[in-house]
Image: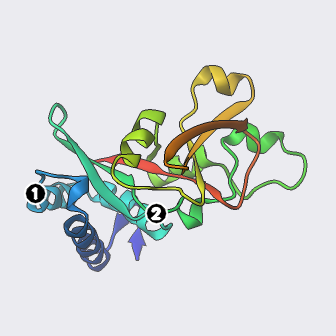
Amino acid sequence: MTMGNKLSATDSKTLIEILKARFEKNSNRHEGLEWDKVQAKLEANPEKLWSLNEMERTGGEPDVVNYDKNTDEYIFYDCSAESPKERRSLCYDRQALDSRKENKPKNNVIDVAAAMGITLLSEEQYQELQKLGNFDTKTSSWIETPAEIRKLGGAIFADFRYGNVFIYHNGAESYYAARGFRGALKV
């Protein structure tokens, strides 16, 4: 059970156990990093733990993918094999959602990510993720769209097909059952 943007002690403990098991199972994603240091950071930042729980709850399977020495932060990405199940069928942003006159999706990725306390993966981050495994082989994920593309009505998304990462464009108001979004969180 959550209390505002903070998990209960029981839920925190459960999530930390899930994250630890994933960390140990996927050591190739974070070579040289130690779980005890990650856990200490998580326990010191309950609001970040809440965001990770939102990532987990919506099917993202968050895992540590990097460590930023300059800011002393661990970087988590959604590492589910396919785009997180509970974050699909969303258009890109509020402007796109408001522009639809009929058949509106239930929400948009920018607002959902902000409510979760995470950011969309950038194109560079998406490329980094794909070096850790093959993700989005059957789905696609909206990624952070450059302002100049968005100004013209578009948004970008990515997937992995034929042994390659593809970056595509679509109208920002579009949405599909097989397209969601992946997030990043620094702790």
The CA span between labels 2 and 1 is 24 Å
| Left or right side of 182 for 170 | right
- At label 2, counting other C-alpha atoms closer than 10 Å, the crowd grade (few under 14, some 14-19, many 20 or more) is some
Disc number placed over residue 6 in the picture, else none: none
> Residue 140: horizontal and vertical position, in percent?
59, 52
State the SS at label 2: loop
| Left or right side of 1 for 138 | right
State the residue position of label 1: 34
At a point 27% along the width and 69% down the height, the residue shown is 22
**Split into 4 quadrants, where in the image is the N terminus?**
bottom left
- At label 1, counting other C-alpha atoms closer than 10 Å, the crowd grade (few under 14, some 14-19, many 20 or more) is few
State the SS at label 1: loop
| Left or right side of 122 for 18 | left
State the residue position of label 2: 81
Looking at the image, which is closer to me, 7 or 133? Answer: 133
Q: Earlier in the sequence, mark 2 or mark 1?
A: 1
Quarter residue 14 falls in = bottom left
At a point 44% along the width and 63% down the height, the residue shown is 80
Q: Tell me: residue 152, above or below residue 119.
A: above
> Residue 97: horizontal and vertical position, in percent?
75, 45
